[in-house]
Every structure is written in structure tokens, then in C-alpha cells.
Amino acid sequence: MIQTDILIIGAGPCGLFTVFEAGLLKLRCHLIDALPQPGGQCTEIYPKKPIYDIPAYPSILAGDLVDRLMEQAEPFKPGFTLGERAEQIEKDADDQFIVTTNRGSKHRAPIIAIAGGLGCFEPRKPPVPKLVDFEDKGVEYIIKDPEFYRDKKVVISGGGDSALDWTIFLAEDVASEVTLVHRRKEFRGHLDSVQKVMDLASAGRVNLITDAEVIGVEGNGKLSSVEIKTKAEGNRSLATDHWVPLFGLSPKLGPIADWDLNITKNAVEVDTFDYSTNVPGVYAIGDINNYPGKLKLILCGFHEATLMVQSAFKRIYPDKNLVLKYTTVNGVNGF
């Protein structure tokens, strides 16, 4: 069994920043995440997407932000249980929480910080016949490693930021051929990304098909082509090695919904004094919580994490005086 001071459910940006803030108070942290690597959505969904509202960074790629947060947390030696989902929570005789994952791993701590973003995610799958037969055999819903598509023919469907960002990235120096299929002429993503796709299409580096959608998949054990329905030209078959439908992810709270927390519209209700839940010792920070005036920004999650660990320290050490120390005076090693 893994013992720690603060057990963090979710290894996204808010969970990683919690490690730093807790470390300044000499509190140990261990993080559980269902994804196979830290970073949450920033790593899994849009690592190449620029983020503009992180202080001191006019622009930083989501993946680079995760790298910086990992570097910031490293001096405090956090533990990680990755690729496992927190399933059950119970209390032992010493008033400590025991959290068991779907793989049977057990973790023990006096404090739990839920930093699970929007919860567990499931891809929104298009209603295409035989789609399930080609999952992981040419059909992928998330691009994890761009090198997987090196010198391959790739069809991407979607009109949001993820579809645009990956179209640009793969077309510039990865895939041999990139086709973007969107059911409308207008895109929902950033105007800058839309313009880049248009420029790549004009240069012949992206095959842009609008007012269209993929309605069929074909192949012998592995995807070899997709059928595309267009408004202007009817149906056509397009040879491809991969089809990546990027229609977003459906967030679900998952097992957290059964933890006796006050939940409203898939979000955990918290007290803004310290972001505590109705269960003493359990806190919720980041996109997964809810309170009047809530803004779902990484910046706000960092603020919530900072106040949360102050409260956690007082709960763990009720007889100790907690004096705020500035990192500008003490540095990180001074804590």
C-alpha cells in the first residue's frame, strides 16, 4: 500500500501544480491518473495547442506547459500511479482514506485532492457501420504519438481546434498525405489555425474536403479506405492508412460520482474558502469543481490548489502554526 500526505486524483496541470505547493509545506504527494502519462488533456488531446493565459508565457504549447510543471514538481519527488483509475474510497480506523484503483492498487492518505479535470473521457464516435472493427486497426480517436503517422496517408474528420491543430502538425513534416474532412464550410477553431489549414490546402499539402463526412470504412483486417459523402459530388472512396475522427470527448465523472460528494451537473460542489467538499478531508480543484462564479481556466485551478494545500496542512497538523513563506526569500530548497 502506498502511503502519502495528499493523494491527488488526476495528474493534469492542476494536480501537478499541487505537488509544488504542497512541497513548499513539506507535504508529500502521490498522483493517480487513468491516462498512461501525466498531463491530462494537455498531453492526451492537444499537446501542440498553444495556451495564452499562463502568466509570464505570452504563448506556450500545452505539452511544454506539462513539461515545465513536471520540472517544477521534480524537487519534491511525487509518486505516480498511471494507467489506473481511482475506483473505491473508504476510511480506516485511523481516519485515513484508502483509495483502490481498478487494478487493485491501494493508496492511503489523510487528504484527497480531486483534480480530475472534467472527469473520465470517452471519444464521441461517429455512427459509421463496422467502425468498431477497425478501432486500433487504422481508426484512432486520439493522436498520442505523431510519429505513428510518419509517411502514412491520414484522414482527419472534425472542425474544431484538435482537428485543425493535428492537420497542420501532420501535414508540415510527418504524414505523406493529409486529408481534412468537415461537414461544414466554416470551422470552430482559432482563426489563425483555420488560416494555416487554408494556406496548406492552397499549397497542395492538405486535401481539404468541406460540406462532407465520412460514412463508411473498408479494409481486410486493417483500414484501407474510407467512403466520403459530399454535398457537391456525391460519394467517393479515398485510400488511407488511418482515419482519425476528432469530434471531441464526452466527460464522465466515473466512480467519483459514487463517493457521496455533492455533485451538480457533473461537477463537485466546493467551499471557496479552501475548495473543500462536503466530505471532510476531500478537496476538489480545477475543472471538476463548481462554485458561484467558477471559471474553467488552468490559471484558476492553480489558485485553488494553492489555497487547498494550506487547508490540508492545517488538517494534517492542527497543532502546528503555518506561517506563509515567500519563495523569493527562501527559494525552493529552503522549504
Image (cartoon, grey):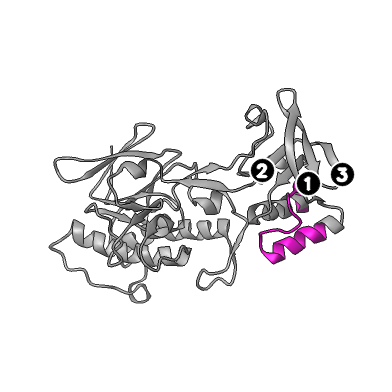
Provide the residue designation for mark 3. Answer: 233
Task: Identify the residue at image location x=81%, y=46%.
Answer: 231
- Choose the circle earlier in sequence order: 3 or 1: 1
Q: In the image, which residues are magenta?
A: 172-200
Look at mark 2 in the image and give the residue it sits on.
Answer: 245
Q: Nearer the viewer, mark 2 or mark 3?
A: 3
Q: Is residue 272 left or right of residue 136?
A: left
Residue at 44% x, 48% y: name it.
119
Disc 1 designates what residue? 179
Dot 1 amino acid type: Thr
Marks 3 and 1 sit apart, C-alpha to C-alpha, by 16 Å
**Image x and y of residue 265, in percent:** 40, 53
Q: Judging from the image, what secondary structure is the residue with disc 2 in? A: strand
Q: Amino acid at mark 3?
A: Glu
**How far from the left and from the top, in percent, is residue 131?**
66, 31
Where is residue 27? Give x, y as percent: 28, 57
**In the figure, 216 relative to 280: above or below?**
above
